Image (cartoon, grey):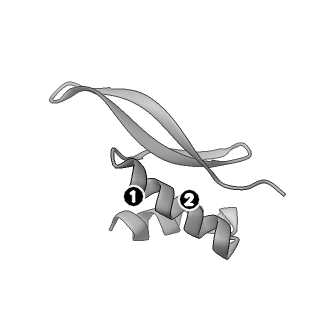
């Protein structure tokens, strides 16, 4: 069984320049650039794994988490 994992990316915004941000991935499904706070996203990844969140609910769960 695949687990959710933390992913890291480097992004660029004209207003702020280059920054590192974190996202979540499970298999081929990924959501990038959730937050620049690694611990915040890692807690979310751990929660998704503990609750065995279905990937069909991942987008809504991310929106709830950051909302």
Point out the tag, 2 or 1, that comes first from the N-terminus.
Answer: 1
Name the residue at the bottom extreme.
51
Q: Residues within 10 Å of mark 2 (few under 14, many from 20)?
A: many
Residue 66 image point, x, y percent: 36, 63
Vertical position of residue 32 compared to residue 41: above or below: above
Q: Which quarter of the figure is the N terminus placed in?
A: bottom right
- Residue 7, numbered label: none
According to the picture, the residue beneath numbered tag 2 turns out to be 45
Residue occupying the point 60% across, 45% down: 30
Q: Residues within 10 Å of mark 1 (few under 14, many from 20)?
A: some
According to the picture, the residue beneath numbered tag 1 turns out to be 40
Residue 51 image point, x, y percent: 65, 75
Q: Is residue 62 left or right of residue 6?
A: left
Residue occupying the point 36% across, 33% down: 20
Label 2: which secondary element: helix
Q: In front: 19, or 60?
A: 19
- Asked if labels 1 and 2 touch by Cβ distance under 8 angstroms, the answer is no
Q: Is residue 37 left or right of residue 2?
A: left
Name the residue at the left extreme.
15
Q: Is residue 43 left or right of residue 25?
A: left
Residue 67 image point, x, y percent: 32, 68
């Amino acid at each position: 069984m695949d687990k959710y994992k933390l992913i890291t990316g480097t992004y660029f915004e004209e207003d702020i320049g280059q920054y590192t941000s974190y996202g979540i991935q499970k298999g081929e499904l990924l959501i990038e650039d959730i937050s620049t706070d690694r611990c915040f996203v890692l807690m979310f990844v751990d929660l998704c794994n503990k609750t065995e969140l279905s990937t069909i609910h991942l987008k809504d769960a991310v929106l709830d988490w950051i909302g």
